[in-house]
Amino acid sequence: MENGRANMKPVTGISQVTCTAPVNIAVIKYWGKRDEQLVLPINPSLSVTLSQDQLCARTTVAASADFKRDRVWLNGQEQSVDAPRLQKCLGEIRRLARKRKHKDERAGDLLGSCVHVCSENNFPTAAGLASSAAGYACLVQSLAKLFHIDGDVSHIARQGSGSACRSMYGGFVEWTMGRLEDGADSVAKQVAPAEHWPELRVLVAVVNAGKKAVGSTEGMQTTVKTSALVKYRAEHVVPSRQEDMRQAILERDFQTFGEITMKDSNQFHATCLDTYPPIFYLNETSKHIIHLVHRYNRHHGKIKAAYTFDAGPNAVLYLLQDDVPEVLALLRHFFPPSSTNNSEREFVQGLPDANRKDL
Ligand code: DP6
């Protein structure tokens, strides 16, 4: 984890900026929108932003009067610039730049120019590893720097991908629901910087690096339409959980932090099962990891590791620094890295089903 907005390091030129932005992993999950256009959530959420030297997006944006049109490349492949969320972010940045040019004339300098965007992830895209979060956070941060826009722009990143607003800050970050109709107050806020809890560690266990079957946007739409549980969760569970989680972080209380993290992941996946037709993001390996963590914690008589799963089977484990060697050894024992898939093994601890030993 790293801290604050310094998290994103600009490498500025006259009309070119490069930023990196890390992935964030929610401990209180966002799942469901009350406004699809503005990307306003049905519940607040809270996450931990990882260190940017591990899972991150790197984006270069350039503006030039010579460019004939806006263009975008993702991981070396040109993408359609007409994607609505991309258009939304570009449009919002230009709108802000127009507004600000009276205060800072540099903000208006590039308004007549087209932009080229080049973004890369150093981890599997769309495998349920928050790639869109890092990607849109990075895009919006780079564009804001290019157009000389200061201040919080998490409400713009949010419109690229909801969870992206949380990657705009380091450490422990919450995304507020907001009350305003235009969503201007549905923003990311830092609860505590990373150094507040330096012993906290994250292990990412890649169970499957493939593209997820049901994307988050589509998945949560179906959940909101069909699940009674998700409404109950948003109204009766998350508000107090968010408070308890914030307190646990402020007090560095790993027992409460871990328990809420696991319960919230389980409830999120329960809402997926309650969706009609149901959505299954966890696979057998994910479930074995869940059992392993509970057995490990039971053995120690306290929570030493906490799992959480996003919209995919890959496990993220939160734990304290002293327990990393033991938990890693345990994972390696039960899920030995595959000799046939080096890329996954290098990424974290490869966990292919075929090699799993019985627990
Ligand atoms: C399960 O932010 O990817 O990771 O707003 O539609 O782009 P969109 O969804 P996205 O959803 C992330 C869902 C989650 C939980 C979380 O990160 O809070």
Image (spheres, rainbow, N blue to C red):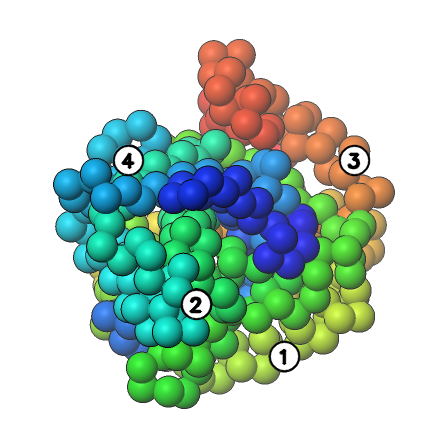
Of the numbered discs 3 and 1, the one sitting upstream in the chain is 1
Left or right: 264 as drawn, with respect to 298: left
The answer to whether the residues at label 2 and label 1 have Cβ atoms under 8 Å apart is no
**Residue at the spot 31% in from the left edge and 86% down from the top edge:** 181
Q: Which residue was labeled with disc 1?
A: 243
Left or right: 155 as drawn, with respect to 323: left
As shown in the figure, which amino acid type bears the numbered disc 4?
Trp
Image vertical order of residue 175 relative to residue 82, above or below: below
The image quarter in which residue 65 lies: top left
Q: Which residue was labeled with disc 4?
A: 73
**Residue at the spot 60% in from the left edge and 28% down from the top edge:** 349
**Residue at the spot 47% in from the left edge and 28% down from the top edge:** 353
Give 113 or 300, whichever is nearer the viewer: 113
Determine the CA span between mark 2 and mark 3.
54 Å
Which residue appears farthest toward the top when viewing the image?
339
Of the numbered discs 4 and 3, the one sitting upstream in the chain is 4
Image vertical order of residue 30 relative to residue 316, above or below: below
The answer to whether the residues at label 4 and label 1 have Cβ atoms under 8 Å apart is no
Indicate the secondary structure of the residue bearing disc 3.
Answer: helix
Q: Which residue was labeled with disc 2?
A: 104
Indicate the secondary structure of the residue bearing disc 4.
Answer: strand
Of the numbered discs 4 and 1, the one sitting upstream in the chain is 4
Instruction: Say whether mark 4 is within 8 Å of ligand 1.
Output: no
Q: Is residue 154 visible?
A: no
Determine the CA span between mark 4 and mark 1.
40 Å
Indicate the secondary structure of the residue bearing disc 2.
Answer: loop
As shown in the figure, which amino acid type bears the numbered disc 1?
Glu
Q: Nearer the viewer, mark 4 or mark 3?
A: 4
Q: Which residue was labeled with disc 3?
A: 326
